[in-house]
Amino acid sequence: MTDPDRGTDRAKRRTKPFLTPLQKYEIFLQMVRQEATMAEAAVQWGVDRGVIMRIRTVAKEGALAALASSRPGRKAAERDFELESARADAVRLGEALKEMAVKLMLVEGKGRWG
């Protein structure tokens, strides 16, 4: 691809610019600090104003979700239901094994074991 063809596809249409997460964050910070309007940021970064709106929306939703999930104080331990179930099964099987050992001892007598 030569320099005059740079940024276009085979049909000579302009390709979409790819913004890294760091660039998107920088755009968001520009908007928050009021360093640029939406239109100015769109022109500066070579994207559509809808892309700028989407970046703002995603950043706001992500920040709100992160703030909502963070609570002051010690974080409660998450319950592992599968582990609790496995432990309950182990206790149940242990009790059943004890019962079977007692029954076997009563039926066969202790003399055969030793």
Image: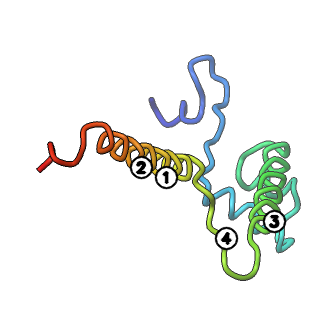
- Does the CB distance between marks 4 and 3 fall below 8 Å? no
Label 4: how many residues lie within 10 Å, few (<14), some (14-19) or many (20+)?
A: few
Given this view, does label 3 or label 2 mark the residue nearer the observer?
Answer: 2
Q: Which residue is mark 2?
A: 94
| Callout 3 amino acid | Ala
Q: Residue at x 67, y 70 (%)?
A: 76
Numbered disc 2: secondary structure? helix
Earlier in the chain: of badge 4 and badge 2, it is 4
Q: CA distance from mark 4 to mark 1?
A: 21 Å
Between 53 and 105, the one lying in front of the other is 105
The mark nearer the N terminus, 3 or 1, is: 3
Viewed as shown, does residue 107 lie left or right of 75? Answer: left
Q: Would you call the spot at circle 1 few (<14 residues within 10 Å), some (14-19), or many (20 or more)?
A: few
Q: Which residue is mark 4?
A: 76
Neighbourhood count class around disc 3 (C-alpha, 10 Å): few under 14, some 14–19, many 20 upward: few
The residue positioned 79% from the left and 57% from the top of the image is: 41
Please report contact status of discs 3 and 2: CB closer than 8 Å, yes or no: no
Q: CA distance from mark 3 to mark 2?
A: 43 Å
Residue 79 vs residue 57: left or right?
left
**Is tag 2's residue or tag 1's residue first in the polypeptide sequence?**
1
Measured in 3D between alpha carbons, the distance from the residue under mark 3 to the one under mark 1, in whole angstroms, is: 33 Å
